[in-house]
Amino acid sequence: MNVRLGPEDQAMVTELRAGGVEMSELVRDAIRTEYGRRRRRLRARDVDAVLAAIYARHPDPPGQPRARPDTLDRRAVREAIRRRLRPERER
């Protein structure tokens, strides 16, 4: 597939390549995304699979603390509240 780019688009491609972005991967992702969007609408049962794929492709850095406690775990919530209520010097 050949694509003719205008000067503005070519400048964007040059900058993306310099930043390490692979154009072939970018085009494949765009094609898959658009095809999937046109093919069918996302159903509730598909959400878990989509999120799992996103998290697998873009994992959180190791050792990063969780931003929020699990709201279903009362002990974790209690500890998060205690941490927030402690004076700054005791943290």
Image (spheres, rainbow, N blue to C red):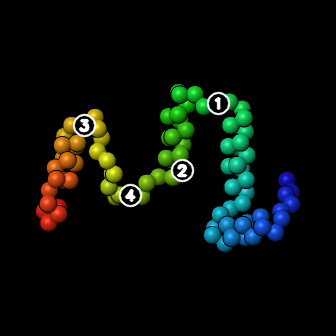
Closest to the camera, between mark 4 and mark 1, is 1
Label ID, residue 73: 3
The location of residue 74, given as percent across then percent down, is 21, 37
What separation in Å lies between label 3 and label 4 (alpha carbons)? 22 Å
What type is the residue that disc 2 sits on?
Arg
What type is the residue that disc 4 sits on?
Pro
What separation in Å lies between label 4 and label 1 (alpha carbons)? 34 Å
Compared with 22, 84 (above or below) is above
Return the residue nearer the eye: 38 or 52: 38
The location of residue 27, given as percent across then percent down, is 73, 53
Does the residue at mark 3 contact the one at mark 4 (Cβ under 8 Å)? no
Return the residue nearer the eye: 36 or 89: 89
Residue under label 4, please give it: 62
What type is the residue that disc 3 sits on?
Asp
What separation in Å lies between label 1 and label 3 (alpha carbons)? 34 Å
The location of residue 17, given as percent across then percent down, is 69, 68
Residue under label 1, please give it: 41
* Residue at disc 1, secondary structure: loop
Q: Quadrant of residue 24?
A: bottom right
What type is the residue that disc 1 sits on?
Arg
* Residue at disc 2, secondary structure: helix
Left or right: where does residue 75 sit relative to residue 5? left
Does the residue at mark 4 contact the one at mark 1 (Cβ under 8 Å)? no
Does the residue at mark 3 contact the one at mark 2 (Cβ under 8 Å)? no
Closest to the camera, between mark 3 and mark 2, is 3
The reply to whether residue 17 is visible in this rendering is: no
Q: Quadrant of residue 46?
A: top right
Left or right: where does residue 52 sit relative to residue 39? left
Residue at horizontal 22%, vertical 43%?
A: 76
Residue under label 2, please give it: 57
